[in-house]
Amino acid sequence: MPKYVVRFGTMRSLGVMSARGGDRHGRGTEVVARTNRGMEVGEVLCEASEQAISNLKNPTHGQILRAMTSEDLNEASHIRAQEADEFTTCKRMVAELGLQMELVDMEHLFGGERIVIYYLAEDRIDFRDLVKQLAAEFQTRIEMRQIGVRDEAKLLADYGDCGKPVCCNTHLDDMPPVSMKMAKMQKATLDPTKISGRCGRLKCCLRYEYDTYNEMRKELPPVGADIITGNGRARILGHEILAQQLLIETEDRRRMLIDATEVLTVLTKEKQK
C-alpha cells in the first residue's frame, strides 16, 4: 500500500498517509484525507520514502480517501466562504462576553467534524461559555487553540523582507529556535528592525546556515589566541568564517586579514564564545 507525505490544515501540518488500494498520487495532487482531527483537504508533497520520513519530526498519520473531485472543490470553496461569516459571529460573541482575547483565524474542517479557533491572549481565558454558544450556533465541535506571535505570522503573513513568501507559511513545519548568537556569528546586522521577521522575532532564516558556520569556525584558531605566522607573532581578533580568514594584530600593533593557512603555530587557545 503506497504512502505519501501530505500537508494539511491551516497550520500546514505534515502527515504520513496511506493510499487506498493501489491508488497513486503525484506531487501537488489535492486530496481528501482522514486525519486524527477528521476529514481534511491536503496536498501530496512526495512519496513517504524512508529518507523523507527521517526528515519529519513526529508526523501524524492518516489515510488518503481520494483525489479531490469537482464536487469536493465546490464544497471546499463553500466552506471557505462560510468561515468568514463564522469568524464574524465568533468575534461578536467574544465582545459580548467581554473576553480579553484576540481572534486570529478560524478553520472549519472539510468533513465538518470541528471548527478550530486560533487566538492570542496574555492571560488564561475561561472560554467555556463561548464554546457552548459557538457549538449551539454551528452545531459542531469547537476547539480553542491559543497561539503565539510566530504562529500568528504563520497564519496571516504573506511576504518577508527578502521578497519571497514567508518561510513559516511555506516550507517550515516546525519553527526552529533562533538566538542573537546566530546573528552575531554570521555577522548579520544587529539592528532589530532588519533581523526581525513579520512576527517581530528573529528571522527563522538565521538558523539555516548556523550549523555550517559553527562547523567552519571549529577549523579556525579561537579569537584571543596567540599565533605564529611567517611574519612573526600575532593575536587573533576576529574571524571571517566563510572566507576562512583571520583578523589579527601583530606585535607592532598592525591589524590585517590573513588566510587561516598562514598560521604556523597556535601558542595559546582561548575558549570560543
Image: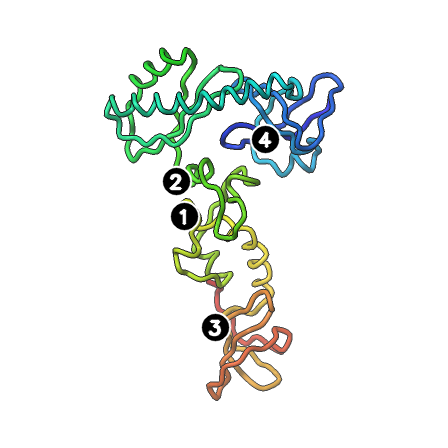
Considering only order in the chain, which callout, 1 or 4, is on the residue closer to the N terminus?
A: 4
- Residue 27, by quadrant, is top right
Q: Is residue 5 above or below residue 202?
A: above
Relative vertical location of residue 122 with respect to residue 162 in this rendering, above or below: above
Distance Cα–Cα, label 4 vs label 3 = 48 Å
Q: Residue at x 56, y 63 (%)?
A: 217
Q: CA distance from mark 2 to mark 1?
A: 8 Å
Q: Residue at x 56, y 28 (%)?
A: 8
Residue type at the position of mark 2: Val
- Three-letter amino acid code at the position of disc 1: Arg
Mark nearer the N terminus (2 vs 1): 2
Between 163 and 12, the residue placed more toward the observer is 163
**Mark 2 neighbour class, 10 Å CA radius: few under 14, some 14 to 19, many 20 or more:** some
Q: Residues within 10 Å of mark 3 (few under 14, many from 20)?
A: some
- Category of crowding for the residue at label 4, using alpha-carbon neighbours closer than 10 angstroms: few (below 14), some (14–19), many (at least 20): many
Front residue (pair 216, 132): 132
Q: Which residue is mark 1?
A: 201
Residue position marked by numbered label 4 in the rendering: 7
Q: Is residue 248 above or below residue 117?
A: below
Which percent across, then down, holds residue 14?
58, 31
Going from the N terminus, do you reach mark 3 or mark 2 first? 2
Which residue is label 3 attached to?
A: 224
